[in-house]
Amino acid sequence: MSLIVQKYGGSSVADADRIRNVASRIARGREAGNDMVVVVSAMGDTTDELISLAHQLVERPDEREMDVLLSTGEIVSSTLLAMTLKSMGHNAVSLSGLQAGIHTDTQYSKARITAIEPQRILQELNKGNAVIVAGFQGLNSQMDTTTLGRGGSDTTAVALAIGLAAHVCEIYTDVEGVYSADPRIVPEAVKIDRIGYEEMLELATYGASVMAPRAVELGQAHGMPIMVASSNSDNAGTLICKEGSMELRNKVSGIAHDTNVAKIMVIGVPDKPGIAREIFEPLARANISVDTIVQNAGLDNVTDITFTVARTDVVKALSIVEPVGRGIGATRVTSDETLSKVSIVGTGMQNTPGYAARMFRALADEGINIHLITTSEIRITCIILEDRVKDAVRALHKAFEVEFRQAE
Ligand code: ADP
Ligand code: ASP
Ligand code: MG
């Protein structure tokens, strides 16, 4: 008998039939003699709908109330799943994040898990229950509900797999694994059998929404293998684990794209020490991640600073940067929400020249203009207009196709 930790995403529990399907899968695991701990996301687009409802009432909803509101989505799906299992003759219990012992820091909407106290889960398993945990939520030191950031049920699942010393964390979704690009945009995308944490983290951070980046980071830090597979089939999925040297064979492993991008420009700032600090320190204090920072060469002691943030953070970021801009004597602060990122990722690129040139050529051949460029050792990202992002993903997939096929 072993302990299995599974997570089912929003589309896998989107309606009564889908919930019944998940319940049968859990029942099968129990009938094979396993202890089952199952994390669920909110049904379908519930989280988006709750966010939109709050914004119909308030421009900037209170962060504490918002987290409690959003956590209700996962309470609905976990309770429905537990009662379905019971009706099928299986002992089951649903637990909220609080009851499951998930402790977090106090950063509403992006809370980080600080500790897992799995006693209640273990007690319920001992009683013979399948344990259904509401994903995406925890409890802070003030006993208030927090949420773990979008896609946070993945993080709950990996954290529980670590806390319960499972051998692997199984993530079930609406695709059969991690592909060389989003299969909804590139139907010819290739399923990756095995991928290292580092590459998966770059893909996820740069938009491959199939895994939440923080969950990959957690898996990497604790050496927890993560299996991504479909809730609709029993086909083998993708194993995310420590990379072996074999993977260096394929230089580009995947293409990611992200439309949750906004550019902020602080124009006409004095070119002197301390200016970047004045802009970026308060953003960091507000827990806003900044990416792709470009400062133009100063002319007449005046320069422009451009950077990107998540589009979902732009209102908050502008409310911080606009007064700072006035304080440091900037001419103006503007924002642009028409952009997206497209990235190629692969550990094998790091010592091989020519990848950037191939990427730029593929985009140029499609007539796609590059606004900004950023790189890491294993990634090249171009910021382009959002209305060309799908064309860009397809063109890049075509340009690097040979490398994906090598990995098959
Ligand atoms: P869940 O609700 O199960 O968490 P998500 O919608 O968060 O599911 O993630 C699954 C989706 O991720 C897929 O439907 C697919 O469109 C998208 N996706 C983006 N990039 C990739 C990729 N490289 N491989 C697989 N799926 C991807
Ligand atoms: N329901 C949350 C979201 O939509 C968490 C998750 O699905 O993982 O982001
Ligand atoms: Mg997800």
Image (cartoon, rainbow, N blue to C red):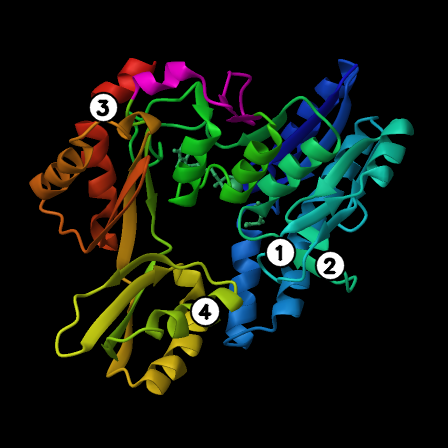
On residue 111, which mark appears? 1
Q: CA distance from mark 3 to mark 2?
A: 46 Å
Q: Can you say whether 117 is above or below 32 in the image?
A: below
**Depth-wise, is mark 3 or mark 2 nearer the camera?**
2
Label 4 SS: helix
**Depth-wise, is mark 2 or mark 4 nearer the camera?**
4
Mark 1 Cα-neighbour bin, 10 Å: few <14, some 14–19, many ≥20: many
Label 2 SS: loop
Amino acid at pointer 2: Asn
Question: What range of the chain is rendered magenta?
Answer: 226-250
Q: CA distance from mark 1 to mark 2?
A: 8 Å
Discs 3, 2 touching: Cβ within 8 Å: no
The residue sitting at 46% across, 29% down in the picture is 175
Amino acid at pointer 4: Glu
Q: Is residue 20 magenta?
A: no
Question: In terms of depth relative to the viewer, which is nearer, 355 or 189?
Answer: 355
Q: Is residue 242 magenta?
A: yes
Q: CA distance from mark 3 to mark 1?
A: 38 Å
Label 3 SS: helix
**Closer to the N terminus: mark 1 or mark 2?**
1
Q: Is residue 94 left or right of residue 177?
A: right
**Closer to the N terminus: mark 3 or mark 1?**
1
Discs 1, 2 touching: Cβ within 8 Å: yes
Q: Which residue is mark 2?
A: 140
Label 1 SS: loop
Q: CA distance from mark 1 to mark 4?
A: 19 Å
Q: How far from the left and from the top, in percent, is residue 291?
A: 36, 56
For residue 257, which quarter of the picture? top left
Q: How far from the left and from the top, in percent, is residue 357?
A: 13, 36
Q: Which residue is mark 4?
A: 281
Amino acid at pointer 3: Glu
